[in-house]
């Protein structure tokens, strides 16, 4: 199975070429090429680089160290030429960056391999990228809570025209003929900037950044990305400064001290502006309202993943669990993995029901980051007449239990599960959840959630691959044509999707501007990471039989099938084979 790599000729030719409409489809080099012989290539339609970070985790687990080194060398080319890592490998991406994860990847590589020689070039590149973010994306924000002022980063692209890769979509968003109120030229330019800034976030698009979450263009017209202080972005930058200080170590104490000082300022801003101690969750800070947003998203787990653990979480095991209580609820309430939000009426790909591989990695890693004295108690259970929703701190999700997205289809019946109370926890078993692995004696609550998350993610990846024609010669026969026809996968050999459904374990995600992508780097990378780190806790996935839904989309890349939650076919491949069939 393709892990998202593309072997290229030695770098006498560009690693990426760009499509430029103004030159009648002329292919022009974007990145200079002088030294490296391989590069990580995204399988998506837009030649974006965002999957590299998740892919690197799988490459390191696979001991493909030269490929990781080559990838980092190429990123250093880009940083030296442009000051940042562009959003993709075409010239029209030069007005927006990737999220600043270069230092994270550099540190992971050095820690894993012990190869410090890369730092001769890597440290100056890291300095350059962080300086670009400080100069071009950082503003002063005065807290309405404490009166303190902080230097905080935001996504903000200077752009006044449709994105070339989504020209028609952007134009129709701005000039939608079905909407009664046309935009002025100034308003149109601002919205184009918002659309480009939304792409820079990597969450293109989500209700998270909409002033009025709605379906389609009316909602996108309310994008307010530039007036948000994103908790995930600032957490990434905090950790980047900490990691860079660690990479300097004793070789340059003044530089290390400077980065630790900057990190301390970002940390203070995150805790002041984005942490809600009463709800035990992080929320983006909204500059328009001068207050925290109320939309609960997977970004809430980024601070702890990056080493920012609030005092309230450190104060007790009950509070530490409360911070992760929504994870427990999802494992019990839904068939799939953790969704990006619980907003399911926008049709946007960074909203429910979509669940993204990097978020599963980040949540599991955040659970790992907790001090051990906070994780020894057993997983809490709901009281009589309650569900796991009742274990979530009041107001954290900003939804009543009845308002949460429903989990459809059960035992081949096209009916919604009970929306509230114990009946809503349809996947709960004795000490575990469906497709959550097996409980062990003395298992603490965080270990339970990590095990369940790892198993559920592996199940989602493998069952969706199996449902689209995947097989293992001599071990796992391909589904019969009658079943593959339900997923439009006759003649297909299995897809590794970029995103999955929170409602199904063998369905891709959906929504957004393009057909769901396959062959995906971060999907494979997180899968390899999960099997390497949680292999002993994994059990064979239970893949339910395919059930025809009322609506399906054409093509294997647009799989939308509905599944029962319990029973069905077990994938008859041992967990130890998971890594091998990907390579």
Image: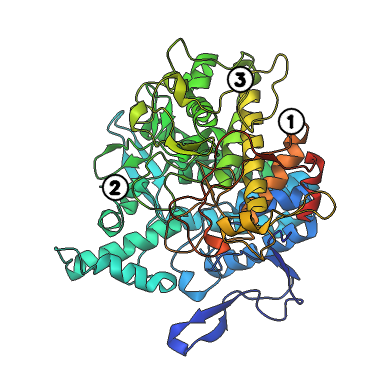
Q: Which residue is mark 3?
A: 445
SS category of the residue bearing label 1: helix
Q: Label 2, on which residue?
A: 213
Viewer-proximal residue, 392 or 573? 573
Nearer mark to the viewer, of 3 and 1: 1
Q: Is residue 176 left or right of residue 313?
A: left
Task: Determine whether 491 is above or below 290 in the image.
Answer: below
Distance in Å between CA atoms under marks 1 and 2 = 39 Å
Q: Mark 3–mark 1 contact, CB under 8 Å?
A: no
Per the image, label 2 sits on a secondary structure element best described as: loop
Does any portion of residue 319 appear in the rendered image?
A: yes
Rounded to the nearest whole Å, what is the CA distance between mark 3 and mark 2? 34 Å
- Residue 30 percent coordinates (x, y): 57, 76
Mark 3 and mark 1 lie on one chain; the one further toward the N terminus is 3
Seen at 30% across and 71% down, the residue is 171
Judge whether 395 appears above or below 410 on screen. Answer: above
Please give the residue where the numbered disc 1 appears in the rendered image: 537
Can you give x and y, in whole percent of width and height, for residue 141 in the image?
33, 42
Q: Which sits earlier in the primary sequence, circle 1 or circle 2?
A: 2
Q: Can you tell which mark lies on residue 405?
A: none
Q: Earlier in the sequence, mark 3 or mark 2?
A: 2
Does residue 390 appear left or right of residue 56 in this picture?
Answer: left
Q: Residue furthest front?
A: 482
Residue 110 in the image, given as x and y percentages of width and height: 74, 48
Outermost residue on the top side: it is 384
Quadrant placement of the C terminus: bottom right
């Amino acid at each position: 199975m393709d892990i998202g790599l593309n072997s290229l000729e030695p770098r006498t030719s560009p690693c990426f070429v760009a499509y430029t409409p103004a030159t009648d489809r002329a292919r022009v080099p974007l990145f200079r090429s002088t030294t490296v012989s391989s590069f990580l290539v995204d399988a998506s339609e837009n030649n974006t680089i965002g999957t590299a970070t998740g892919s690197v985790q799988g490459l390191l687990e696979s001991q493909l160290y030269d490929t990781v080194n080559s990838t980092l060398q190429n990123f250093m080319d880009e940083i030296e030429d442009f000051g940042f890592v562009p959003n993709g490998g075409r010239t029209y991406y030069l007005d927006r960056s990737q999220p600043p994860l270069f230092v994270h990847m550099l540190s992971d590589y050095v820690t894993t391999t012990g190869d410090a020689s890369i730092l001769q070039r890597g440290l100056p590149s890291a300095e350059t990228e962080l300086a670009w973010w400080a100069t071009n994306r950082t503003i002063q924000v005065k807290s309405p809570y404490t009166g303190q002022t902080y230097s905080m980063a935001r996504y903000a692209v200077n752009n006044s025209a449709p994105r070339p890769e989504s020209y028609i979509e952007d134009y129709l968003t701005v000039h939608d003929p079905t909407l009664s109120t046309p935009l002025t030229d100034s308003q149109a330019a601002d919205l184009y900037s918002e659309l480009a800034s939304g792409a820079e976030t990597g969450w293109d698009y989500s209700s998270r950044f909409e002033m009025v979450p709605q379906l389609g263009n009316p909602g996108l017209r309310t994008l307010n990305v530039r007036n948000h202080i994103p908790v995930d972005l600032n957490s990434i930058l905090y950790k980047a400064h900490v990691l860079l200080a660690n990479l300097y170590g004793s070789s340059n104490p003044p530089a290390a001290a400077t980065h630790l000082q900057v990190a301390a300022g970002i940390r203070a801003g995150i805790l002041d502006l984005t942490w809600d101690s009463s709800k035990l969750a992080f929320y983006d800070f909204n500059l328009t309202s001068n207050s925290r947003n109320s939309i609960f998203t997977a970004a809430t787990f980024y601070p702890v993943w990056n080493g920012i653990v609030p005092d309230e979480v450190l104060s007790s095991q009950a509070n530490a669990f409360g911070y992760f209580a929504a994870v427990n609820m999802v494992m019990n309430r839904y068939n799939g993995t953790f969704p990006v939000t619980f907003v399911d009426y926008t049709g946007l790909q960074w909203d429910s029901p979509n669940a993204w591989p990097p978020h599963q990695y980040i949540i599991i890693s955040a659970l790992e980051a907790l001090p051990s004295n906070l994780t020894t108690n057993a997983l809490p259970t709901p009281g009589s007449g309650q569900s796991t929703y009742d274990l979530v701190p009041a107001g954290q999700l900003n939804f009543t239990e009845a308002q949460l997205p429903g989990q459809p289809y059960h035992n081949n019946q096209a009916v919604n599960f009970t929306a509230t109370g114990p009946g809503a926890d349809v996947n709960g078993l004795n000490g575990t959840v469906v497709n959550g692995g097996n409980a062990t004696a003395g298992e603490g609550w965080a270990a339970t959630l990590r095990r369940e998350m790892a198993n559920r993610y592996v199940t989602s990846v493998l069952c969706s691959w199996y449902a689209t024609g995947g097989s293992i010669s001599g071990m796992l026969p391909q589904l019969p044509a009658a079943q593959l026809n339900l997923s439009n996968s006759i003649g297909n050999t299995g897809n590794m999707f970029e995103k999955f459904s929170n409602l199904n374990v063998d369905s891709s995600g959906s929504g957004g501007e393009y057909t769901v992508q396959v062959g995906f780097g971060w999907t494979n990378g997180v899968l390899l990471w999960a099997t390497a780190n949680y292999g002993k806790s994994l059990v064979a996935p239970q893949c339910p039989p395919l059930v025809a839904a009322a609506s399906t989309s054409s093509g294997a890349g647009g799989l939308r099938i509905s599944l029962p939650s319990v029973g069905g076919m077990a994938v008859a491949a041992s967990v130890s084979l998971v890594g091998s069939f990907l390579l």
